[in-house]
Amino acid sequence: MTQYTINQQTRDFLDEHHLYEDDDIQQIQLQHRLALVDAFALPKGGRILEIGCGQGDTTMAIAHAIGEDGSVTAIDPASREYGAPFTLGQATDRILQSTLGDRIMFHLETDFLDYEVSEPFDVAVLSHCSWYFKSATELLALLKKVRPAAKQICFAEWDLAFTDLGQRSHFCAVSILALYSQFIENDSNVQTLFHKTEIRRLLEQAGFTTDAPATVDATHLPDGGWERGYANSIRTELEEAAPAMGSLLTSYYELLNEPDDAIPSLNSFVLSGA
């Protein structure tokens, strides 16, 4: 079993809030979300809107960072039954029962395009959710609705510009999964890949003025290995659905599987705008 190294910031969070103390995977995911939220520099006591909250990994980090006087409104279109190893319902219920629960309001099965915002939030957060969108047009439509709903925006996603050759395997995996989504309808977390330059352009088209992107290390996460496994599992189905791409897919799969051992995940980038 892989042993993950948990830093002191994460240990302090676990000691204070008693969440996922027996789950190494959730702890290492939480550690990354705490690092992302540090990069966001959210205001203490702030009203935060989180779009695409999923199981609430980033929600926990946000609620911890803004303190007892802050609040998080966390929205996700998926149902309570979606997700693994914990469903969204199981994960969010557990968070709400913790010491962070009073600061959080979850709205599952909710499309933000249909959500009414009565008063602008201090910050809107989109963390590792943009690749779920079917197209840049869909993402831009959401960002345009976010613009009047929040004074600032903080955006995080995997960084396709890998800096370590070992990260190439994760890059190839998500590229294969994005191609898969173009040929075969599925509900995976990779529908469309966005480079950080395109995200910055979309944010500016929506009316935000953005800062230069920052990088948050994510090489320690297991996501690259998970994505490689999933990409390998759909190889036959994809090759049958896209025979004209046979040589390209073969090349990608050769690169994907060159390393036999654990692979470093892609880093994350963070963009902030107002």
Image: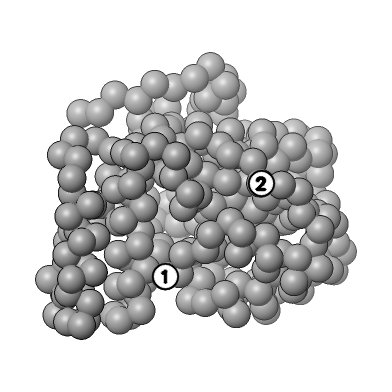
Other residues around mark 2 within 10 Å, as few (<14) / some (14–19) / many (≥20): some
Element under label 1?
Answer: loop
Q: Residue at x 81, y 58 (%)?
A: 209
Side of 130 relative to 168 (left or right): right
Q: Nearer the viewer, mark 2 or mark 1?
A: 2
Left or right, residue 66 beside residue 111: right
Quarter of the figure with residue 191: bottom left
Above-or-below relation of 155 to 249: above
Residue 188 visible, this angle: no
SS type, badge 2:
loop
Q: Quadrant of the N terminus?
A: top left
Question: Which residue is under mark 1?
Answer: 191
Q: Is residue 39 above or below residue 9?
A: below
Q: Residue at x 18, y 35 (%)?
A: 261
For residue 141, above or below residue 272:
below
- Residue 126 relative to residue 89: left or right: right
Q: Camera-side residue: 209 or 100?
A: 209
Q: How is the image coloured?
A: one colour
Residue 223 is drawn in which quadrant? Answer: top left
Q: Amino acid at mark 1?
A: Gln
Let me know if residue 247 appears in the view: yes
State which tag comes first along the sequence, 2 or 1: 1
The front one of 274 and 145 is 274
Work out how far the residue at label 2 is from the one at label 1, CA to CA, in angstroms: 23 Å
Q: Quadrant of the C terminus?
A: bottom right
- Which residue corresponds to the image point at 44% horizontal and 22% vertical from the top-left? 6
Q: Is residue 48 left or right of residue 159?
A: right
- Image spot of residue 227 (x, y percent): 30, 53
Q: Please give the residue where the numbered disc 2 appears in the rendered image.
A: 213
Residue 166 at x, y = what percent? 31, 39
